Image (tube, rainbow, N blue to C red):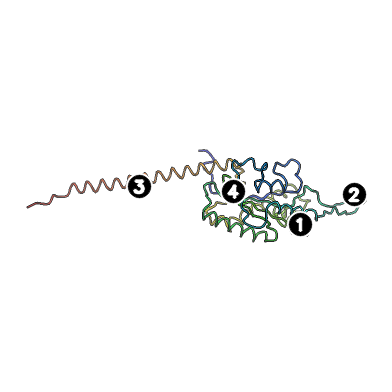
Amino acid sequence: MNTLKAMVTHGQFLRIEKFAVKTSRGKRSPSNIYQVAYEAMRKPGFCDHIKYPTLPKVIFGIQPVDAALRAEAWALKQTARVFHKPTNCILVRKVRADSSCAAVGVLSVPPEWVADEQWVRFRESSVDWLMRKFHQDRLLSVVEHTDEHCLHLHFWVVPKMGERFSSVHQGVKALEDVGIKASRAVREAAYRKAMATLQDEFHEEVGQFFGLERLTLGRRRLTREQWHQKCFYEKEREIATQKRIDAAVARAVSGLESHDSEDSANLPVPSTN
């Protein structure tokens, strides 16, 4: 059996990435806050991967571009303390332009979902969860996209002035907690555990109430294309199962009708006298 066929179809998809004002070296496009914002708003030249792009709907907060401006404003106010060896003292400097200033996430549902009442309830529940998780003063924007294979939401979270970036990204917070002197293995384990906890929280408060499984794309380490294939195979299996059920019911009904006909044939013919 193809391993994709055996995987869970209805897994939740939640992903959060860090973005900066300036593109980080080696990062794929879109790779900075403005490129991500332009893609989210379907600006020509930034959404070529979508065959028929449509204007998105902002369902909470401000436009993604405005959220990017807020993120840059936060970044310009940030400073970093660095040790200067020649003078043996601590210096305060502005943070680098490629330092993270916005956490941008995606909440997606399986491809068989349509924009019906269930999607509206999921959308509302997801926004409520985001507000509880990050608070309204950090959650700046939530945008709905319906022009791709899966319905999904894009959300923007930016720290408040005076806060560190770890206030909006619990993976980064976990790294701060273990400290920079911890080994690479310890830091990676802390980061993965923190992000897994985020998945658990969303599933417990939202995903499970919509039939979504905790087993996610990230944990299976599948590409998006593989995930779509997995969903397709599962849908085909559901259709085949339903056909077998319908056929069994039809045979049962046919058998009952045949049995009734035989019983009728064996009944004594009433006398006409």
**Label whose residue precedes the other's in the sequence (1 or 2):** 2
Q: CA distance from mark 3 to mark 1?
A: 62 Å
Question: For the residue carrying disc 1, how many other residues have a C-alpha within 10 Å: few (<14), some (14-19), or many (20+)?
Answer: some
Q: Amino acid at mark 4?
A: Thr
Q: Residue at x 66, y 43 (%)?
A: 44
Question: For the residue carrying disc 2, how many other residues have a C-alpha within 10 Å: few (<14), some (14-19), or many (20+)?
Answer: few
Q: Which residue extends farthest top? A: 1
Question: For the residue carrying disc 3, how many other residues have a C-alpha within 10 Å: few (<14), some (14-19), or many (20+)?
Answer: few
Name the residue tied to disc 2: 85
Residue 166 picture location, percent across and down: 73, 55
Name the residue tied to disc 3: 249
Q: Amino acid at mark 1?
A: Arg
Mark 1 or 2, which is nearer the eye?
1
Residues at circles 1 and 2 in contact by the CB criterion of under 8 Å: no
Mark 3 or 2, which is nearer the eye?
3
Q: Amino acid at mark 3?
A: Val
